[in-house]
Image: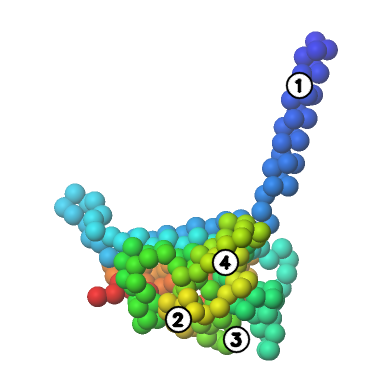
Amino acid sequence: MRSMRLVGITVAALVVMGSVLEAQDRPASPRGFTATQFGGSYDAEGAYQGGHWIDIRYGRPILRGRQGIFGEGAEYGQQLYAGAPLWRVGADQTTTFTTEADVLIGGQRLAAGEYSMFADLSNPTAWTLIFTTWQGKETFREDNPNALWGAYGYTDEKDVMRTTMTVDETPRSADNLWIGFTDMAGQGGTLNIIWDNQRAHVPIELAN
């Protein structure tokens, strides 16, 4: 019986140790993924055919009790830049936006492909959403002059498209950053970026 108790204690200790190590390895900002498929139609059997995918991969920072994370006046957005020239629209690795088809975002055409996505927050009521061909680093220390960690080292020569997002204040504070789509109909809907009490949004649709 004594040996069985010792085995039980040992197993419990290993479980606790494993949980502690897992918590230590857990990133402060969990990775996020959002996707939509649109532009297709349903056949007679109810199967969706011919749609095009959009995928967005990003880090999801958490407020952890902070208020007014975006700041006000001349300081608006500066805390999120953290010394970079733009906001990475997330945390850690550069945010990526992949589309299978040409789309119009705020009336501006973006060709099918994979892009890094940034935001210029210099106007608190109208963010500039930026799509570039900069690659993203997997780690901060990766030695790749053609890739960025977040927005550090960003320059505009790889910009592909810029568009304007309308910014509203929300009645509730979102604890995690959320990027996603709303009101998606057959050919398009709205792309949203929501964190704290700020919601930036812009129409998105398939390009002809």
Badge 4 element:
loop
> Looking at the image, can residue 4 be seen?
yes
Residue 25, relative to residue 93: is it above or below?
above
Q: Report crowding for label 1: few under 14, some 14 to 19, many 20 or more residues within 10 A (C-alpha).
A: few
The numbered mark, 3 or 2, whose residue comes first in the sequence reads 3
User: Would you name the residue on which mark 3 appears?
Assistant: 122
Whether label 4 touches label 3, CB < 8 Å: no
> Marks 1 and 2, how far apart in space?
60 Å
- Closer to viewer: mark 3 or mark 2: 2
At x 69% / y 42%, what residue is drawn? 22
> Marks 4 and 1, how far apart in space?
52 Å
The numbered mark, 4 or 2, whose residue comes first in the sequence reads 4
Residue 145, relative to residue 14: is it above or below?
below
Q: Quadrant of the N terminus?
A: top right
**Where residue 166 sits in the image (x, y, percent)?**
49, 83
- Closer to viewer: mark 3 or mark 1: 3
Count of numbered badges drawn on the protein:
4
User: Would you name the residue on which mark 4 appears?
Assistant: 145
> Marks 3 and 2, how far apart in space?
14 Å
- The residue type indicated by label 2 comes to Arg
> Marks 4 and 3, how far apart in space?
27 Å
Q: Report crowding for label 4: few under 14, some 14 to 19, many 20 or more residues within 10 A (C-alpha).
A: few
Q: Report crowding for label 2: few under 14, some 14 to 19, many 20 or more residues within 10 A (C-alpha).
A: many
User: Would you name the residue on which mark 2 appears?
Assistant: 162
Badge 1 element:
helix
- The residue type indicated by label 1 comes to Gly
The numbered mark, 4 or 3, whose residue comes first in the sequence reads 3
User: Would you name the residue on which mark 1 appears?
Assistant: 8
- The residue type indicated by label 4 comes to Pro
- The residue type indicated by label 3 comes to Ser
